[in-house]
Image (spheres, rainbow, N blue to C red):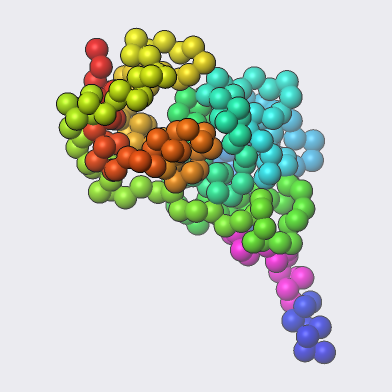
């Protein structure tokens, strides 16, 4: 009887996995910040942004007939999959994952708010909803950069010295021909992107390797160099 009572209490509280992510009911309220562009639930369709039904485990840029940004198409080509590990930093700051995203959302800084929104969105994705530790429901890896990292003042001359490998693929004149331009890129965006590659949140394997060899100071130096190219 005691076991049955515990089981009934768990069932009345909702899916077991929901508590592992966040409060889905509160997430529904917070989703109002997203609803001007995105729909989710029965009869959801793409509007300014793609619908979010089945977003967990879905490849980036996979909704047919929706016009994605070129940056999102590149992320899709790199193999970006929407899981908690990628959705959480995207909600925190879309530029962490997609530098040229058209999404104007400024980001959701509170980790609890993000967890609650993701718990709500998880209601509209496929099983295994009852296996919180399995992909695509694995708990997110922390991505937030410390103020100390963001405050590093890069040495422009050192950044120019380090930039030779970058220039083998990225053009200094800002041309964007299959490979995104990083010339005159805001340094904070550069730093966010490189650390996302370094932590293997952005999926491009070559960039993961390149970023993995760089120190925080070297990333800051490259950022200030590419930001100030004339």
Q: In which quarter of the image is the C terminus?
A: top left
Name the residue: 24% across, 20% down: 228
Q: What stretch is highlighted in magenta?
A: 9-23
Magenta-drawn stretch contains 15: yes
Q: Where is residue 109 in the image (x, y as percent from the top left)?
A: 43, 47
> Could you tell whether 9 is left or right of 204 in the image?
right
Q: Is the magenta stretch mostly helix, strand or loop?
A: helix
Q: In which quarter of the image is the N terminus?
A: bottom right
Instruction: Name the image quarter holding residue 42.
Output: top right
Percent across and percent down for residue 35 are 62, 37
How many marks can you see?
0
Up-down relation of residue 220 to residue 86 (above or below)? above
Q: Residue at x 19, y 30 (%)?
A: 158
- Can you give x and y, in whole percent of width and height, for residue 181 in the image? 41, 18
Q: Is residue 179 magenta?
A: no
Q: Going 77% across and 70% down the picture, which residue do you hit?
A: 11
Image-quadrant location for residue 221: top left
Can the viewer see residue 37?
Answer: no
Up the image or down, 22 lies above or below 8; here it is above
Residue 103 horizontal side relative to residue 53, left or right:
left
Along the viewing direction, whichever of 123 and 182 lies nearer the viewer = 182
State whether residue 112 appears in this view.
yes
Q: Residue 7, position in %: x, y?
A: 77, 78
Residue located 71% across and 61% down the image: 131
Q: Is residue 61 left or right of residue 94?
A: right
Q: Which of 27 and 141 is in front in this view?
A: 141
Residue 198 horizontal side relative to residue 43, left or right = left
220 or 165, nearer to the observer: 165
In the picture as drawn, the residue positioned furthest to the bottom comes out as 1
């Amino acid at each position: 009887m005691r076991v049955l009572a515990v089981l009934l209490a768990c069932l009345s509280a909702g899916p077991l996995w929901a508590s592992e992510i966040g409060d889905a009911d509160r997430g529904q309220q917070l989703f109002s910040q997203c609803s001007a562009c995105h729909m989710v639930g029965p009869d959801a369709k793409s509007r300014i942004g793609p619908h979010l039904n089945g977003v967990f485990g879905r490849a980036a840029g996979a909704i047919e007939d929706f016009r994605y940004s070129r940056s999102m198409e590149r992320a899709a080509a790199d193999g970006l999959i929407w899981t908690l590990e990628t959705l959480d930093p995207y909600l925190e700051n879309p530029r962490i994952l997609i530098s040229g995203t058209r999404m104007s959302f400024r980001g959701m800084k509170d980790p609890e708010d993000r967890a609650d929104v993701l718990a709500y969105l998880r209601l509209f994705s496929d099983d295994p909803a009852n296996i919180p530790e399995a992909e695509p429901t694995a708990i997110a890896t922390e991505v937030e950069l410390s103020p100390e990292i963001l405050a590093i003042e890069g040495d422009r001359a050192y950044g120019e010295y380090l930039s030779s490998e970058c220039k083998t693929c990225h053009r200094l004149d800002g041309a964007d021909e299959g490979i995104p331009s990083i010339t005159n890129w805001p340094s904070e965006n550069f730093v966010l992107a490189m650390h996302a590659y370094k932590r293997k949140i952005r999926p491009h394997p070559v960039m993961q390797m390149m970023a993995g060899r760089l120190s925080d100071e070297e990333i800051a130096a490259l950022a200030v160099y590419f930001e100030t190219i004339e």
